[in-house]
Image (cartoon, grey):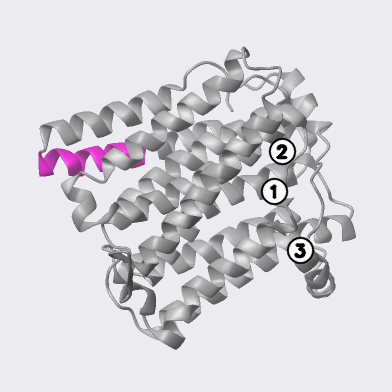
Amino acid sequence: MTDLTEKDLENMKNHKYQTTGYTTIDNKMNPFWTKCASFLPKSISPNMITATGLFCQLLGITIIGLNDLTLSKKLPSFIYIFCSFMLFLAQTFDAIDGKHARNTNRSSPLGQLMDHGCDANDNFLFCLMISQSHLFGPTIYTQLMEIGIQIAFYGFTLEEHFTGVLRTQSNNIGVTEYQFFSMFLVIIPVFIGHFFSNISIFGMKLNYFLLIIVFICAVGQTFDLIRVNYNGLKDTFEKWNHLIELSVFCVAEVFSTRMTFYKSKPFLIILCNGLHFSLMASKLIICNMAKKKFGNFDIDICVYVCTIFITVFIGSSILEYFAVIFLFGWFGYKYYLHVIMAIFKMMDYLKIPF
Protein backbone atom coordinates (compact mmCIF):
# COMPACT_ATOMS: atom_id res chain seq x y z
CA MET A 1 0.00 0.00 0.00
CA THR A 2 1.25 3.46 -0.78
CA ASP A 3 0.88 4.65 2.81
CA LEU A 4 3.24 2.02 4.27
CA THR A 5 5.47 3.63 6.88
CA GLU A 6 8.96 2.54 7.85
CA LYS A 7 7.46 0.90 10.94
CA ASP A 8 5.04 -1.04 8.73
CA LEU A 9 7.88 -2.19 6.49
CA GLU A 10 9.91 -3.25 9.53
CA ASN A 11 6.94 -5.26 10.80
CA MET A 12 6.65 -6.89 7.39
CA LYS A 13 10.36 -7.67 7.44
CA ASN A 14 10.01 -9.40 10.83
CA HIS A 15 6.74 -11.13 10.00
CA LYS A 16 6.73 -14.86 10.77
CA TYR A 17 4.53 -17.01 8.57
CA GLN A 18 2.54 -19.47 10.68
CA THR A 19 0.07 -22.04 9.38
CA THR A 20 -1.96 -24.95 10.70
CA GLY A 21 0.36 -27.46 9.03
CA TYR A 22 0.19 -30.09 6.33
CA THR A 23 -2.63 -32.44 5.39
CA THR A 24 -2.19 -36.13 4.57
CA ILE A 25 -2.17 -35.42 0.83
CA ASP A 26 0.38 -32.63 1.36
CA ASN A 27 2.70 -35.14 3.01
CA LYS A 28 2.14 -37.60 0.15
CA MET A 29 2.94 -34.91 -2.43
CA ASN A 30 5.95 -33.42 -0.63
CA PRO A 31 8.53 -35.90 -2.04
CA PHE A 32 7.37 -35.05 -5.58
CA TRP A 33 7.46 -31.29 -4.88
CA THR A 34 10.88 -31.55 -3.22
CA LYS A 35 12.23 -33.40 -6.26
CA CYS A 36 10.79 -30.77 -8.61
CA ALA A 37 12.36 -27.98 -6.55
CA SER A 38 15.77 -29.66 -6.81
CA PHE A 39 15.69 -29.30 -10.62
CA LEU A 40 15.24 -25.52 -10.53
CA PRO A 41 18.29 -23.42 -11.43
CA LYS A 42 19.57 -21.37 -8.50
CA SER A 43 19.55 -18.29 -10.70
CA ILE A 44 15.73 -18.28 -10.76
CA SER A 45 14.22 -16.32 -7.90
CA PRO A 46 11.46 -17.93 -5.76
CA ASN A 47 9.11 -15.03 -6.50
CA MET A 48 9.49 -15.65 -10.22
CA ILE A 49 8.32 -19.22 -9.63
CA THR A 50 5.28 -17.92 -7.74
CA ALA A 51 4.46 -15.55 -10.58
CA THR A 52 4.86 -18.38 -13.11
CA GLY A 53 2.19 -20.36 -11.27
CA LEU A 54 -0.23 -17.45 -11.57
CA PHE A 55 0.67 -17.07 -15.25
CA CYS A 56 -0.27 -20.72 -15.88
CA GLN A 57 -3.78 -20.10 -14.58
CA LEU A 58 -4.08 -16.84 -16.51
CA LEU A 59 -3.09 -18.74 -19.66
CA GLY A 60 -5.88 -21.27 -19.08
CA ILE A 61 -8.42 -18.51 -18.46
CA THR A 62 -7.30 -16.67 -21.58
CA ILE A 63 -7.98 -19.78 -23.69
CA ILE A 64 -11.47 -20.04 -22.20
CA GLY A 65 -12.17 -16.32 -22.66
CA LEU A 66 -11.15 -16.41 -26.30
CA ASN A 67 -13.55 -19.30 -26.94
CA ASP A 68 -16.52 -18.57 -24.70
CA LEU A 69 -17.44 -15.37 -22.84
CA THR A 70 -20.90 -16.78 -22.03
CA LEU A 71 -19.62 -19.73 -19.95
CA SER A 72 -22.27 -21.88 -21.61
CA LYS A 73 -20.68 -23.36 -24.74
CA LYS A 74 -19.43 -26.93 -25.01
CA LEU A 75 -15.74 -26.55 -25.78
CA PRO A 76 -13.36 -29.12 -27.31
CA SER A 77 -11.98 -31.66 -24.86
CA PHE A 78 -8.39 -30.50 -25.32
CA ILE A 79 -9.27 -27.12 -23.74
CA TYR A 80 -10.48 -28.80 -20.53
CA ILE A 81 -7.39 -31.01 -20.49
CA PHE A 82 -5.16 -27.99 -21.03
CA CYS A 83 -6.87 -25.95 -18.28
CA SER A 84 -6.70 -28.83 -15.81
CA PHE A 85 -3.00 -29.26 -16.59
CA MET A 86 -2.47 -25.52 -16.04
CA LEU A 87 -4.08 -25.89 -12.61
CA PHE A 88 -1.71 -28.76 -11.86
CA LEU A 89 1.30 -26.69 -12.92
CA ALA A 90 0.06 -23.75 -10.85
CA GLN A 91 -0.32 -26.03 -7.81
CA THR A 92 3.19 -27.39 -8.34
CA PHE A 93 4.80 -23.97 -8.68
CA ASP A 94 2.85 -22.80 -5.62
CA ALA A 95 4.23 -25.74 -3.63
CA ILE A 96 7.87 -25.52 -4.72
CA ASP A 97 8.50 -21.76 -4.54
CA GLY A 98 9.06 -21.90 -0.77
CA LYS A 99 11.21 -25.02 -1.05
CA HIS A 100 13.34 -23.33 -3.72
CA ALA A 101 13.66 -20.26 -1.48
CA ARG A 102 14.98 -22.43 1.36
CA ASN A 103 17.26 -24.38 -0.99
CA THR A 104 18.86 -21.14 -2.20
CA ASN A 105 18.72 -19.35 1.17
CA ARG A 106 16.44 -16.64 -0.25
CA SER A 107 13.41 -16.91 2.03
CA SER A 108 11.85 -13.51 2.73
CA PRO A 109 8.54 -11.94 3.83
CA LEU A 110 8.13 -10.78 0.23
CA GLY A 111 7.65 -14.45 -0.66
CA GLN A 112 4.58 -14.70 1.56
CA LEU A 113 3.09 -11.54 0.11
CA MET A 114 3.64 -12.85 -3.40
CA ASP A 115 2.40 -16.35 -2.60
CA HIS A 116 -0.73 -15.38 -0.67
CA GLY A 117 -1.40 -12.46 -3.01
CA CYS A 118 -1.40 -14.81 -6.00
CA ASP A 119 -3.75 -17.11 -4.07
CA ALA A 120 -6.19 -14.18 -3.86
CA ASN A 121 -6.25 -14.11 -7.66
CA ASP A 122 -6.66 -17.88 -7.87
CA ASN A 123 -10.20 -17.65 -6.48
CA PHE A 124 -11.90 -16.12 -9.49
CA LEU A 125 -9.67 -18.05 -11.91
CA PHE A 126 -10.86 -21.34 -10.36
CA CYS A 127 -14.43 -20.05 -10.52
CA LEU A 128 -14.24 -19.21 -14.22
CA MET A 129 -12.70 -22.54 -15.18
CA ILE A 130 -15.20 -24.60 -13.19
CA SER A 131 -18.19 -22.50 -14.28
CA GLN A 132 -17.32 -22.95 -17.95
CA SER A 133 -16.57 -26.66 -17.56
CA HIS A 134 -20.05 -27.22 -16.17
CA LEU A 135 -21.86 -24.64 -18.31
CA PHE A 136 -23.20 -22.49 -15.48
CA GLY A 137 -23.61 -19.68 -17.99
CA PRO A 138 -25.04 -16.24 -17.17
CA THR A 139 -26.93 -17.46 -14.10
CA ILE A 140 -26.80 -16.34 -10.51
CA TYR A 141 -25.19 -19.70 -9.68
CA THR A 142 -21.97 -18.67 -11.41
CA GLN A 143 -21.74 -15.62 -9.19
CA LEU A 144 -22.66 -17.65 -6.09
CA MET A 145 -19.72 -19.95 -6.80
CA GLU A 146 -17.37 -16.98 -6.89
CA ILE A 147 -18.89 -15.56 -3.69
CA GLY A 148 -18.59 -18.89 -1.88
CA ILE A 149 -14.89 -19.17 -2.73
CA GLN A 150 -14.34 -15.52 -1.78
CA ILE A 151 -16.06 -15.88 1.59
CA ALA A 152 -13.93 -18.89 2.53
CA PHE A 153 -10.65 -17.25 1.45
CA TYR A 154 -11.42 -13.91 3.08
CA GLY A 155 -12.53 -15.65 6.27
CA PHE A 156 -9.22 -17.50 6.63
CA THR A 157 -7.24 -14.33 5.84
CA LEU A 158 -9.29 -12.35 8.35
CA GLU A 159 -8.66 -14.99 10.98
CA GLU A 160 -4.92 -14.61 10.38
CA HIS A 161 -5.30 -10.84 10.82
CA PHE A 162 -6.40 -11.33 14.44
CA THR A 163 -4.65 -14.58 15.44
CA GLY A 164 -1.39 -14.43 13.48
CA VAL A 165 -1.97 -17.97 12.16
CA LEU A 166 -3.20 -18.76 8.66
CA ARG A 167 -5.53 -21.76 8.61
CA THR A 168 -4.32 -23.70 5.58
CA GLN A 169 -6.32 -26.80 6.47
CA SER A 170 -9.27 -27.81 8.57
CA ASN A 171 -10.09 -31.41 9.50
CA ASN A 172 -7.27 -32.60 7.24
CA ILE A 173 -8.77 -30.84 4.21
CA GLY A 174 -6.84 -27.87 2.89
CA VAL A 175 -5.61 -25.96 -0.13
CA THR A 176 -4.10 -28.97 -1.90
CA GLU A 177 -7.33 -30.94 -1.65
CA TYR A 178 -9.35 -28.04 -3.08
CA GLN A 179 -6.84 -27.67 -5.91
CA PHE A 180 -7.10 -31.35 -6.85
CA PHE A 181 -10.88 -31.15 -6.63
CA SER A 182 -10.84 -28.15 -8.99
CA MET A 183 -8.68 -30.06 -11.47
CA PHE A 184 -11.16 -32.95 -11.30
CA LEU A 185 -14.14 -30.66 -11.91
CA VAL A 186 -12.46 -29.00 -14.89
CA ILE A 187 -11.38 -32.21 -16.64
CA ILE A 188 -14.39 -34.43 -15.89
CA PRO A 189 -16.40 -33.24 -18.97
CA VAL A 190 -13.72 -34.92 -21.11
CA PHE A 191 -14.80 -38.33 -19.79
CA ILE A 192 -18.54 -38.02 -19.10
CA GLY A 193 -19.50 -34.91 -21.03
CA HIS A 194 -21.63 -32.29 -19.33
CA PHE A 195 -23.46 -34.96 -17.36
CA PHE A 196 -24.20 -32.79 -14.30
CA SER A 197 -25.98 -30.17 -16.39
CA ASN A 198 -28.35 -32.73 -17.91
CA ILE A 199 -29.77 -34.25 -14.70
CA SER A 200 -32.16 -32.57 -12.26
CA ILE A 201 -32.77 -33.11 -8.55
CA PHE A 202 -35.87 -31.57 -6.97
CA GLY A 203 -36.35 -29.55 -10.14
CA MET A 204 -32.81 -28.16 -10.05
CA LYS A 205 -29.97 -29.14 -12.37
CA LEU A 206 -27.43 -31.33 -10.59
CA ASN A 207 -24.54 -28.94 -11.22
CA TYR A 208 -26.47 -26.11 -9.56
CA PHE A 209 -27.52 -28.38 -6.72
CA LEU A 210 -23.91 -29.36 -5.97
CA LEU A 211 -22.88 -25.72 -6.19
CA ILE A 212 -25.46 -24.68 -3.58
CA ILE A 213 -24.07 -27.34 -1.23
CA VAL A 214 -20.53 -25.99 -1.70
CA PHE A 215 -21.78 -22.43 -1.13
CA ILE A 216 -23.55 -23.38 2.09
CA CYS A 217 -20.42 -25.18 3.35
CA ALA A 218 -18.27 -22.11 2.63
CA VAL A 219 -20.67 -19.79 4.46
CA GLY A 220 -20.99 -22.24 7.34
CA GLN A 221 -17.21 -22.47 7.63
CA THR A 222 -16.99 -18.68 7.84
CA PHE A 223 -19.62 -18.51 10.58
CA ASP A 224 -17.59 -21.11 12.47
CA LEU A 225 -14.52 -18.87 12.16
CA ILE A 226 -16.53 -15.98 13.57
CA ARG A 227 -17.81 -18.12 16.45
CA VAL A 228 -14.31 -19.26 17.37
CA ASN A 229 -12.44 -15.98 16.97
CA TYR A 230 -14.92 -13.24 17.81
CA ASN A 231 -15.81 -14.31 21.36
CA GLY A 232 -15.07 -11.47 23.78
CA LEU A 233 -14.38 -9.05 20.94
CA LYS A 234 -17.89 -8.37 19.69
CA ASP A 235 -17.58 -4.63 20.26
CA THR A 236 -14.42 -4.26 18.21
CA PHE A 237 -15.44 -2.09 15.26
CA GLU A 238 -12.54 -3.20 13.07
CA LYS A 239 -13.61 -6.84 13.22
CA TRP A 240 -17.21 -6.21 12.25
CA ASN A 241 -16.19 -3.61 9.68
CA HIS A 242 -14.43 -6.33 7.68
CA LEU A 243 -17.54 -8.49 7.60
CA ILE A 244 -19.82 -5.56 6.78
CA GLU A 245 -17.61 -4.64 3.83
CA LEU A 246 -17.51 -8.23 2.59
CA SER A 247 -21.31 -8.57 2.95
CA VAL A 248 -21.99 -5.34 1.03
CA PHE A 249 -19.57 -6.41 -1.68
CA CYS A 250 -21.22 -9.83 -2.03
CA VAL A 251 -24.71 -8.28 -2.25
CA ALA A 252 -23.49 -5.96 -5.02
CA GLU A 253 -21.95 -8.96 -6.82
CA VAL A 254 -25.31 -10.71 -6.80
CA PHE A 255 -26.95 -7.50 -8.04
CA SER A 256 -24.44 -7.34 -10.93
CA THR A 257 -26.07 -10.47 -12.39
CA ARG A 258 -29.06 -8.28 -13.30
CA MET A 259 -26.97 -6.36 -15.83
CA THR A 260 -27.70 -7.05 -19.48
CA PHE A 261 -23.93 -7.22 -19.98
CA TYR A 262 -23.81 -10.17 -17.55
CA LYS A 263 -26.42 -12.01 -19.60
CA SER A 264 -24.20 -11.86 -22.68
CA LYS A 265 -20.67 -11.84 -21.19
CA PRO A 266 -20.67 -13.23 -17.64
CA PHE A 267 -16.98 -14.11 -18.04
CA LEU A 268 -16.03 -10.41 -17.96
CA ILE A 269 -18.26 -9.56 -14.98
CA ILE A 270 -16.89 -12.47 -12.94
CA LEU A 271 -13.38 -11.35 -13.93
CA CYS A 272 -14.09 -7.76 -12.87
CA ASN A 273 -15.61 -8.80 -9.55
CA GLY A 274 -12.69 -11.15 -8.99
CA LEU A 275 -10.16 -8.37 -9.57
CA HIS A 276 -11.95 -6.26 -6.96
CA PHE A 277 -11.91 -9.12 -4.47
CA SER A 278 -8.22 -9.75 -5.13
CA LEU A 279 -7.58 -6.09 -4.29
CA MET A 280 -9.60 -6.37 -1.06
CA ALA A 281 -7.88 -9.58 0.04
CA SER A 282 -4.39 -8.38 -0.91
CA LYS A 283 -4.80 -5.21 1.13
CA LEU A 284 -5.85 -7.33 4.11
CA ILE A 285 -2.82 -9.59 3.61
CA ILE A 286 -0.54 -6.53 3.63
CA CYS A 287 -2.20 -5.29 6.83
CA ASN A 288 -1.68 -8.74 8.37
CA MET A 289 2.04 -8.61 7.67
CA ALA A 290 2.44 -4.93 8.64
CA LYS A 291 0.40 -5.44 11.83
CA LYS A 292 -1.73 -2.43 11.07
CA LYS A 293 -5.45 -1.82 11.16
CA PHE A 294 -7.35 -2.21 7.95
CA GLY A 295 -8.96 1.21 8.25
CA ASN A 296 -12.50 2.48 7.91
CA PHE A 297 -15.00 1.62 5.18
CA ASP A 298 -13.13 1.10 1.92
CA ILE A 299 -13.67 3.70 -0.84
CA ASP A 300 -13.19 1.00 -3.48
CA ILE A 301 -16.30 -0.83 -2.26
CA CYS A 302 -18.26 2.43 -2.33
CA VAL A 303 -17.20 3.00 -5.95
CA TYR A 304 -18.07 -0.56 -6.93
CA VAL A 305 -21.46 -0.63 -5.19
CA CYS A 306 -22.52 2.78 -6.54
CA THR A 307 -21.45 1.90 -10.08
CA ILE A 308 -23.30 -1.43 -10.08
CA PHE A 309 -26.52 -0.13 -8.51
CA ILE A 310 -26.71 3.01 -10.65
CA THR A 311 -25.99 1.05 -13.83
CA VAL A 312 -28.64 -1.58 -13.08
CA PHE A 313 -31.17 1.08 -12.05
CA ILE A 314 -30.73 3.07 -15.28
CA GLY A 315 -30.71 -0.09 -17.40
CA SER A 316 -28.77 1.30 -20.36
CA SER A 317 -26.68 -1.22 -22.33
CA ILE A 318 -24.25 1.48 -23.44
CA LEU A 319 -23.83 2.67 -19.84
CA GLU A 320 -23.12 -0.91 -18.77
CA TYR A 321 -20.24 -1.18 -21.25
CA PHE A 322 -18.72 2.05 -19.94
CA ALA A 323 -19.31 0.93 -16.33
CA VAL A 324 -17.44 -2.35 -16.89
CA ILE A 325 -14.55 -0.55 -18.58
CA PHE A 326 -14.47 1.99 -15.74
CA LEU A 327 -14.42 -0.72 -13.04
CA PHE A 328 -11.63 -2.64 -14.79
CA GLY A 329 -9.62 0.58 -15.04
CA TRP A 330 -10.35 1.62 -11.44
CA PHE A 331 -9.44 -1.69 -9.84
CA GLY A 332 -6.46 -2.21 -12.12
CA TYR A 333 -5.09 1.19 -11.09
CA LYS A 334 -5.85 0.59 -7.41
CA TYR A 335 -4.22 -2.85 -7.56
CA TYR A 336 -1.09 -1.22 -8.92
CA LEU A 337 -1.25 1.56 -6.35
CA HIS A 338 -1.80 -0.62 -3.27
CA VAL A 339 -0.37 -4.04 -4.10
CA ILE A 340 2.30 -3.68 -6.79
CA MET A 341 3.71 -0.58 -5.11
CA ALA A 342 3.79 -2.44 -1.76
CA ILE A 343 5.86 -5.16 -3.44
CA PHE A 344 8.26 -2.56 -4.83
CA LYS A 345 8.54 -0.89 -1.41
CA MET A 346 9.33 -4.22 0.24
CA MET A 347 11.93 -5.04 -2.40
CA ASP A 348 13.58 -1.68 -1.81
CA TYR A 349 13.41 -1.97 1.98
CA LEU A 350 14.72 -5.54 2.07
CA LYS A 351 17.29 -4.80 -0.65
CA ILE A 352 16.32 -7.86 -2.67
CA PRO A 353 15.48 -8.26 -6.39
CA PHE A 354 12.20 -9.69 -7.61
Instruction: Classify 24 as above or below 348.
Output: below
In the foreground, 350 or 257: 257
Q: Amino acid at mark 3?
A: Ile
| Label 2 vs label 3, nearer the camera | 3
Q: Amino acid at mark 1?
A: Phe
Residue shown at the point (78%, 73%) measured from the top left: 36
Q: Main secondary structure of the magenta part?
A: helix
Residue that sits furthest to the front in the current view: 202
The reply to whether callout 1 and callout 2 are in contact (CB within 8 Å) is: yes
In-image side of 308 versus 25 (left or right): left
Part of the protein shown in magenta: 316-329
In the foreground, 185 or 350: 185
Provide the residue designation for mark 3.
96
Q: Amino acid at mark 2?
A: Met
Is residue 340 visible to the viewer in this orientation of the structure?
A: no
Provide the residue designation for mark 2.
347
In-image side of 68 versus 313 (left or right): right
Marks 1 and 2, how far apart in space?
Answer: 7 Å
Marks 2 and 3, how far apart in space?
Answer: 21 Å
Measured as percent of width and height from the top left, residue 8 is found at 72, 22
Sequence-wise, which precedes: disc 2 or disc 3?
A: 3
| Label 3 vs label 1, nearer the camera | 3
